[in-house]
Image (cartoon, coloured by chain):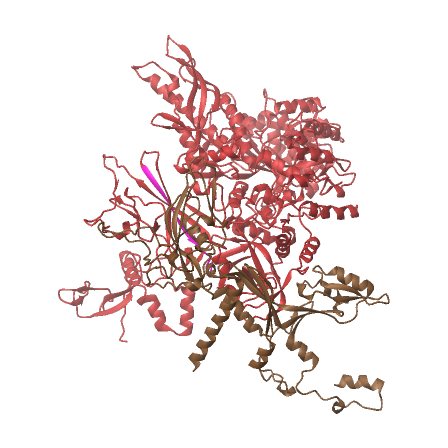
Amino acid sequence: MDKQDVGNEGGEEKKPFSIWDLPDVPMGKLPPHLELQRTRVVCNPDAPIHTENIMYSGAYASMGVDNSLRLDHFRDNFRVEVKRLNKEDMEFDMIGIDAAIANAFRRILIAELPTMAIEKVLIANNTSVIQDEVLAHRLGLIPLNVDARLFEYLSANDQPNEKNTIVFKLHVRCKRGDPRMTVYSKELKWLPKGSEFIQESDNPNAKPVTYTSFSSSQDSMPEFSNNPISPTEDNIIIAKLGPGQEIELEAHAVKGIGKTHAKWSPVATAWYRMLPEVVLLEDIEDGDAKELKKICPVNVFDIEDFGNGKKKATVARPRQCTLCRECIREAKWEKHVALRRVKDHFIFTIESTGALPPEMLFTEAVKILEDKCERVISELS
Amino acid sequence: MGVRQEEVPMDHAELNFIPGSIDKQKLAAPVKSAVDKFQLLPEFLKGRGLVKQHLDSYNYFVKTDIKKIVRANDRIVCKFDPSIFLRFKDVRIGRPSVSRDAVSDDLRPHTCRLSDLTYAAPILVNVEYVQGSHNQKILMEKNDVVIGKMPVMLRSCCCVLYGKDEAELARLGECPLDPGGYFVIKGTEKVVLIQEQLSKNRIILDKDKKGDINASVTSSTEATKSKTVISMDSKTMKMYLNLNQFTTKKIPIMAIMKAMGMESDQEVVQMIGRDPRFGALLLPSMEECASLGIHTQQQALEFLDKKVTPSAFTRSTSEKESRVSYILRSVFLANVPVQENNFRPKCIYVAVMLRRMMEVLLNKDAMDDKDYVGNKRLELSGQLISLLFEDLFKSMISDAETEMVRVLNKQSRSSRFDPSQFIVKDGITNGLERALSTGNWDVKRFRMHKKGVTQVLGRLSFIGTLGHMTRISPQFEKSRKVSGPRALQPSQWGMLCPCDTPEGESCGLIKNLALMTHVTTDEEDGPLISLCYCLGVEDLELLSGEELHSPNSFLVIFNGLILGKHRRPQHFATAMRKLRRAGKVGEFVSVFVNEKQCCVYIASDGGRVCRPLVIADKGVSRIKEYHMKELVDGVRTFEDFLREGLIEYLDVNEENNALIALYDAEATTETTHIEIEPFTILGVCAGLIPFPHHNQSPRNTYQCAMGKQAMGNIAYNELCRMDTLLYLLVYPQRPLLTTRTIELVGYDKLGAGQNATVAVMSYTGYDIEDAIVMNKSSLDRGFGRCIVMKKYSAIHQRHGNDTSEFIMRPTRDAENKLTDNRMRVLDEDGIAAPGEIIRPNDIYVNKRPSWQTFKGPEGEPSVVDRVSLFSDRNNNMCIKFIIRQTRRPEVGDKFSSRHGQKGVCGTIVQQEDFVFSERGICPDLIMNPHGFPSRMTVGKMIELLGGKAGVSSGRFHYGSAFGEPSGHADRVEAISETLVKCGFSYNGKDFLYSGITGTPLQSYVFMGPIYYQKLKHMVLDKMHARGSGPRVMLTRQPTEGRARNGGLRVGEMERDCLIAYGASMLIYERLMISSDPFEVQVCRGCGLLGYYNHKLKTGICSTCKSGDNISTMKLPYACKLLIQELQSMNIVPRLKLDEA
């Protein structure tokens, strides 16, 4: 305050500075710098600042701003805009939501959404170079085109049945004299009636028992009657066989979640990024504008003609910014360009492995979060 | 020039665009003004492989040396009747074979490995001999007589793999990338390490412990080995000879000179040189000689005769020659030949030695450096085996001779006398096999007792194998605490790798060859000597002593032998070099003009290290663009470059006459040679490191040691081999940031690591002290997964008395149920079946009377991988089991990058908790940034940048050592440009979001792929804890060590802590209750131990014969043992008991 005092003296001598002369802080509205801190991550060349979210409801109480999360407010402002959607991946914007909740969706997608994956492999014969465990591990990672919601979890003391197990058969052989062959995932054949392998028993007179006890065939289920279960991709390489080598096995897929093993994760990955906001703090004209446009490797800036021969740089495609920070790398640009991230705008991307379409995955994730909330509520009450 | 230099790397960056190493397109592109000589390297290595030294040496032995040895000792003559003899006419090595039940079978190396055989070939000789005796003698001839079996070096000219292409090698079960150069002895692969030695037959000036100046010559001829030392007493300035054969250490040198016929002192002075200073220095020695009354040759000989050690002299030479003259002739400076009693060359040799000593006295710089690489010779497998073979061959001959005498002495002989039957082949076969398998080289003739010459070839990783083949074992023992031999010598440049040496006691002593080093083999010296005379060397015989050291004339010394002198040394040297470049003289002959010593040294002996260099005329490289183009087109080979005099080999001495420029652009008019590629100064192991020239040097050394412990692929035939221990990586990868060396040695085909996306940040706190945080999903998907294979073997033993062990099928009861559940892995033949899951304590061979059970680690199950049956040399059936276990990384497993940065896995974190970038990239592991400042491994950071640019642009980036100017390493600027083009920050730092809170991190994080190696140290093999368990029988204390399920010792220091803390009961518990408590009966009367009588139920003292004063107390069993042991040696420890 002292410093400012001295500074003011130079200009107006008559009126000594007094803190009382300052305009009132408007109640119910944050001053711009605090508003910036609250809503934006500022990506300085050295490090990003204001990355944290201010969660405390009374954080700005002194300024009469209520920082609490209000449902109606959320309901009014929350928006989802789907930008891209196809079978495998989707990109959508989630606007007006907290990072914690967006992150919760991401975490659920990766780790808690159940899918079916091969868990048990019964190897009858494997003369290939690839070891049994490695082969089993590879099979486990193959995504299966099946909706896990139709199945139940197989718990430790459960019998595998048609409700909780999908059985595949793989029997490939490379004949002697043939060239080397590659085994692809399409060679995994679904056995809707369950396992065909007879369990070894000590009693030769006992009725043969297979490794599963299916009471009905899975292809009689309406969902699979004309949509047989198979790996989502046909051309995943499982193994390579030399002449005379053979693989014969049965793979049992069960339901699980990504937390236990990444093979049950329904997404290749799911992530979000905050909406980039590129702000030109001052007008950038002519040569500088050209330079700025050229500097950006992802073409964020454009040059607009403002008539009278003036050309100004504009931020045309801020969404494309990858935060390479080329535009603020040199000290001279630092004052002109500001890179920011909008804290409540998430560009969410889901890359599905193919079991479920990505939009379905997201709704499922929402359901799981709902369940969790309900559980918390019921536990609390 | 500066501008041009700038251009070169840029062009390379573009040219390299196609992934894959040596693509034709890049090579076909116009070569820039500075000729890219890199292509010479693959060509060079293609022609010779990585272990050419070993192969050359062995081939030389097999082709030349063995013939020389046999020719030198070609007769077995009967001592009584010289007309009865056997003569070896020719010797050769046949095809590798094995004879079983008198049938000879061809051998493949892989068969030997699998069935524990020795890969050896018969030594075939053609002999002619006299049959019969006395009156009827017939000269007989026999061809292809086997005198023994020679172990064959793989890929040598005798090996079945010689000259085979990849497909043929595969058919033979061999890995095409395997370098060969080792032996297979009884199924184990053995390398004969390169032995470092001081050069033979050279004058070496040195100081001894007292500070006296020494001139020593280690003479080595076919017949003898001796060491001659002339030393100068620093106080009296007198010079003495020191030779083992004399009793006193100090024989006045002038007495020796006189004994050799140099009676005139003046002549000696003339020979040494007319410089008055030399004369003055010689004076004390002359005076001493005169004071001893030695003036004539006869007096000198008589004087010396008294000094000869009686026992050291074996009197086998002619009687008339006195002992002294024998010593002077063939022990003293044995390398200088004496023809027809002409001692003059020896006198001159001594004079030269004396002159050098005086020069050293006058000028300290003239001292030789023992650590100088030019003064060293590398002894390779061929030479070592030749020594051994010669010894064995000679002893076979002498054995045959004594046997011949024995048979001839017999009164009545039934069969006809046939000398050829005395050739016994077992001696040579067994001798060679024993030496190679134990590594003990005992050659009595040369008093040679070396241990650890051979080692089992390390097959833990491919790079380890290669590194093992280039290893040089030191001449000194490790215990010596001197820094000199350990220090990096400037003369090692380009010859020995500056990085690759172990840490610890043998640091700097064990060295490794650089990438392009060649080790010479012996060359025929006769033609070379006559060539020297033709080129104007004045013969020593024709020179007076005076002329010897006349100014402006240089002595010509050939392999340590003074040939004569030359008036125009430079002219002579140039002429020799021209002849060499023209291919008229062997390419490895070195010509070295030593201006200081006024000598021209010509060397053609074996064991010198040399390397190829491009010849430059007045600083202009002889290699032009069209040469390289022809090379690329395949019209020209490396040999053509040599033959046409574009490239030549220089040894360390000759390098001193050359001015070698690193790059074409740096050459000046004085430059005589240009390096081919600077990264070849590094060896194989150091060649894996990307950007090693940006690292602190010890880090590169650490990586050299760690690269050998990394898991990966070891060979293409790894799954067909039966190694005792094998670590494999399930999904090995090729490094994203490669070097030229990696491509040259084939590390890109047999990698040992994976490209992990690394974020350099602190996370969870479980990453302090070099620990790394790993992503669980990455591990789920196969990162760092490894297979450990272990060999178990069983022999189906047959005993002498027609009994044998037998293998039983698993026993089953009436219901066909196994009686013993431990037999579940057994097949019907009683041997474990491949593919079965085996658990600890399962029986894998149901052999009776004793079955063998599996003692593997608990935890993840093990699987029987392979079972192989073969019969060993005693025709017993042997069974080898390979049991495999697949392991995923767990907390505590060791990982390392290629920059000597090792660390253990600190914690494993779920992927959803991990950080992720704007593009959704989630790192595989997190490394703590504190690893950087103190380690200064800038190379690792550049590797990260380069790897990141590599994955985003789809091209492998390069990081060869010193490769930036020649385009074999990408510049950071170029890498940054690529990063920016791909939308990353130029500095490699990404904007990350926390996976836990979902908010961005408060700093940008350095993130990108780094090649990580999984090292063989895994917790599963090391973790150990015990409650109660086995005890040692003697002391009843818990056993020691993990293997014996031992206890964890509370040691002295721990005990001290507990004492200081006052936790007496804890000490009591740890040291007694939990260890070896014992109850004893102590007699309060005599203080001795009694015993407890169970009948009377009282303690009784056997000394006092009463049970009255007995107390029962507890003490450690070890204490009771001590008391009894003391008693047994007549010391009576008595216990005094007090009431507590």
Q: Where is residue B216 shown, x and y percent of the image?
A: 59, 36
Which residue is found at the position 33% from the left and 53% from the top? Answer: B839
Q: Where is residue B93 shown, x and y percent of the image?
A: 47, 25
Q: Is B6 in the magenta?
A: no
Which residue is found at the position 56% from the left and 28% from the top? Answer: B328
Q: Is B887 in the magenta?
A: yes
Along the viewing direction, whichever of B638 and B122 lies nearer the viewer: B638
Magenta residues, dominant SS class: strand
In this view, which residue lies farthest toward the top?
B135
Give the drawing colour for chain B. Answer: red
Along the viewing direction, whichever of B406 and A118 lies nearer the viewer: A118
Left or right: A244, with B360 as reference point: left
Q: Is residue B172 above or below residue B699?
A: above
Camera sees residue B384: no
Residue A172 sits in which quadrant?
A: top left
Along the viewing direction, whichever of B77 and B321 lies nearer the viewer: B77
Q: In this view, does B45 lie above or below A252?
A: above
Along the viewing direction, whichever of B168 and B183 lies nearer the viewer: B168
Spot the brown chain and give its letter. Answer: A
Residue A21 sits in which quadrant?
A: bottom right
Left or right: B865, with B618 as reference point: left
Q: Where is residue B60 shown, x and y percent of the image?
A: 54, 29
Q: Dividing the image into 4 quarters, which one contains the C terminus of chain B?
A: bottom left
Q: Is residue B661 above or below residue B308?
A: below
Range covered by the magenta-colored residues: B877-892
